[in-house]
């Protein structure tokens, strides 16, 4: 689970430099933004204050957007926008809007919770599960502060262990010793990443911290052979794992230059995707 504070992200230099021009310089994008606001009452740039992204199996994903949202308008409004713009294979299924529903599974499913929260997911089941109010973020120890906050369950660590074990057995063994984890990425002139690991029952924070530090050293050597596009290599190089009570804390500085390169690359991908979508033939109304 990942939580994004959109106001803090918008103040971060690389985000302002690389992402805001995509909106300001694209007339079609501005026109669509206006159409969405007219139909739904939501200005996606100013009304969305927080985004939470979650998955239980890394196959189905859901994003929840909270902020100043008129209740009960978004799904019907987006259906109107979809019809006007000629989106293909759009249909309503109860209180949900399915986009690209001509195949075995839709490309996206849109819903809105009773409190106004917008829900966008990869399938009907995960969107329906996300609509009721929940305190799941508290159970996962998802931090309430920070531009970016995240939490990983034991199931996620177990799944990651199974995926990496054939190539990195040491990493797989370490991941299986983590019950859950949470952390934050703070931005600004000196971005910093802080992660807290909870060991599984029967393990100790001291033992897990020592093995985590050894693993970070091995990972640093491996990443030295690869291009460090986002600054991950430099961040891992300075990472320190220490036992703090019954948790392991891993802290490091993340180079702002790396985040700038990452934002630039993501913005270019978004621009390319937008250009491709704009040039694609629209379905007949």
Image (spheres, rainbow, N blue to C red):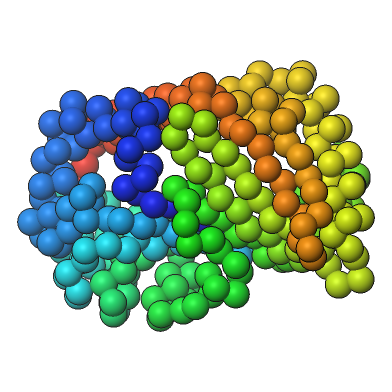
Relative depth, front residue between 67 and 169: 67
In this rendering, the answer to whether 79 lies above or below 216 is below
Relative depth, front residue between 35 and 94: 35
Residue drawn 84% across the image and 50% down it: 209
User: Where is residue 83 drawn, in percent x and y?
Assistant: 15, 56
Q: Is residue 29 visible?
A: yes
Residue drawn 27% across the image and 32% down it: 20
User: Where is residue 265 drawn, in percent x and y?
Assistant: 46, 25
Q: How many numbered tags mark residues here?
A: 0
In this rendering, the answer to whether 210 lies above or below 262 is below
In this rendering, the answer to whether 10 lies above or below 49 is above
Name the side, left or right, on which 91 lies relative to 222: left
Name the side, left or right, on which 231 lies relative to 110: right
| Residue 106 image-quadrant placement | bottom left
Image quarter (top left, top right, bottom left or bottom right) of the N terminus: bottom right
Q: Is residue 91 visible?
A: no
Name the side, left or right, on which 138 lies relative to 225: left
């Amino acid at each position: 689970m990942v939580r994004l504070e959109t106001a803090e992200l918008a103040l971060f230099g690389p985000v302002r430099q690389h992402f805001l021009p995509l909106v300001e310089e694209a007339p079609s994008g501005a026109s669509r933004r206006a159409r969405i606001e007219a139909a739904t009452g939501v200005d996606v740039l100013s009304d969305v204050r927080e985004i939470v992204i979650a998955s239980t199996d890394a196959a189905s994903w859901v994003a929840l957007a909270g902020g100043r949202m008129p209740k009960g308008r978004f799904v019907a409004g987006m259906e109107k926008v979809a019809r006007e713009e000629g989106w293909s294979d759009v249909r309503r299924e109860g209180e949900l809007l399915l986009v690209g529903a001509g195949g075995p599974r839709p490309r996206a499913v849109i819903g809105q919770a009773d409190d106004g929260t917008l829900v966008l997911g990869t399938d009907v089941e995960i969107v329906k599960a996300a609509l009721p109010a929940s305190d799941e973020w508290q159970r996962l120890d998802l931090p309430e502060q920070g531009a970016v906050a995240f939490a990983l369950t034991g199931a996620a660590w177990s799944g990651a262990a199974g995926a990496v074990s054939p190539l990195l057995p040491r990493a797989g063994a370490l991941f299986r010793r983590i019950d859950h984890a949470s952390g934050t990425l703070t931005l600004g002139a000196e971005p910093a990443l802080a992660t807290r690991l909870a060991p599984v029952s029967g393990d100790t924070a001291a033992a897990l911290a020592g093995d985590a530090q050894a693993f970070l050293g091995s990972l640093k050597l491996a990443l030295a052979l690869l291009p460090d596009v986002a600054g991950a290599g430099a961040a891992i190089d300075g990472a320190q794992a220490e036992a703090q009570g019954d948790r392991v804390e891993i802290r490091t500085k993340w180079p702002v230059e790396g985040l700038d390169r990452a934002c630039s690359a993501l913005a270019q991908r978004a621009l390319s995707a937008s250009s491709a979508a704009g040039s694609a033939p629209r379905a007949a109304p």
